[in-house]
Image (spheres, rainbow, N blue to C red):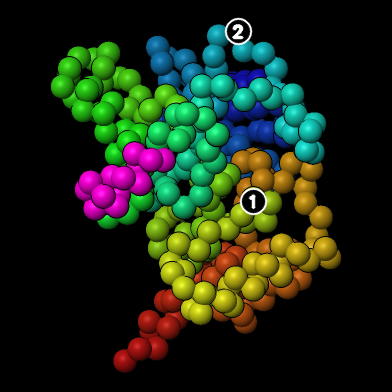
Amino acid sequence: RISQTDGSLSATAQQFGEAAGSLEEDGSLQLGFDAGALRGRAVRELGAVTRLEFENGAVWTRPQGAGPCREPCTEVGGCAAELDPGVDLLVTEEGWGLSSANWLIRRSKWSLDFLMAALTAAHVDMRLFGDQDAIILHLMNEQALTAAARADSAALAGDPLDGHAAVVPQFELNSYDALNALTMDCDAFVEGDLLVTFPQCKDAEGCNDVFNLAADYAGDDAKPPAEPHAGAWWLRREGRPRWPGYTTRSSAAIRVFGPRPVIREIFLREQQMIP
């Protein structure tokens, strides 16, 4: 539930309890959660606020007849959520398009046809730059060209993504190590995320130190316990990890965990030392 009065904004949900903040005339807003403040903007339609878009990619909408928020799933087998039978592929975005790094795909006829078509396009028919281009080609190209050819408002307003695929927030499947997140302006890995991706690691020899550190973190039973809803968007805050194995004196730790302001500071300091 979202309430607005005289420039103030409040929200209540089962997932995070209560949050309060401000809403400016230009639509910019800020809500305070237990983990810190979150900024965003309000989208108005016909003078009323219908959607809140936050800096971490979350979007709150106010659909007609909405029911109560569903309590997040905290244990395997404890979810009452139903999977959409029409969605076969979950994919994320990165700095310049759909990502081919990590995705989830359902075993289905559509999935088999899609994988075969993408691999054939990338390695036989077109010799594309890589699998990423092939995924974009077969998920978006036909719908985008059809909409452009029709050029009517209904076609242009449609989603160019194939209906069998759904784009999910990047951090849910594809958080990047902090160094690449800084240079690519993507989601950085924070404690509570499912996994970390190292997009620039083409061979093990040059990345064994970060691989080993990430494995040590994952297997360390002594690390601080996760929050009840760890990984949820409203708890994601990039900062110094609580894990005792983290130290700013380790280049591998800085690359994996950052945080990005620390990496930026180190880079600028080294630049000043170069004659």
- The residue at which mark 1 appears reads as 193
Is residue 252 left or right of 150 when viewed as pictured?
right
Q: Using the image as rendered, state which of residue 124 and residue 268 is in the foreground.
A: 124
Is residue 96 left or right of 181 when viewed as pictured?
left
Span of residues in magenta: 115-128
Residue 241 vertical placement versus 21 (above, below): below
The image quadrant where one finds the C terminus is bottom left
Residue 85: % across, % down: 56, 21
Residue plotted at (51% across, 49% down): 102
Give the SS element for disc 2.
loop
Q: Is residue 138 visible?
A: yes
Q: Is residue 53 visible?
A: no
- Looking at numbered disc 1 in the image, what kind of residue is underneath it? Asp
Residue 205: % across, % down: 51, 79
Q: Quadrant of residue 7?
A: top right
Q: Main secondary structure of the magenta part?
A: helix
The image quadrant where one finds the N terminus is top right
Mark 1 Cα-neighbour bin, 10 Å: few <14, some 14–19, many ≥20: some
Q: Of the residues tagged 2 and 1, which is closer to the observer?
A: 1
Mark 2 Cα-neighbour bin, 10 Å: few <14, some 14–19, many ≥20: few
Residue 203: % across, % down: 46, 73
Q: Residue furthest top?
A: 65
- Looking at numbered disc 2 in the image, what kind of residue is underneath it? Gly
CB of mark 2 within 8 Å of CB of mark 1? no
- The residue at which mark 2 appears reads as 65
Q: Using the image as rendered, state which of residue 151 and residue 178 is in the foreground.
A: 151
Q: Is residue 116 magenta?
A: yes
Q: Quadrant of residue 172?
A: top right
Residue plotted at (44% across, 81% down): 269
Q: Using the image as rendered, state which of residue 163 and residue 237 is in the foreground.
A: 163
Residue 68: % across, % down: 70, 17
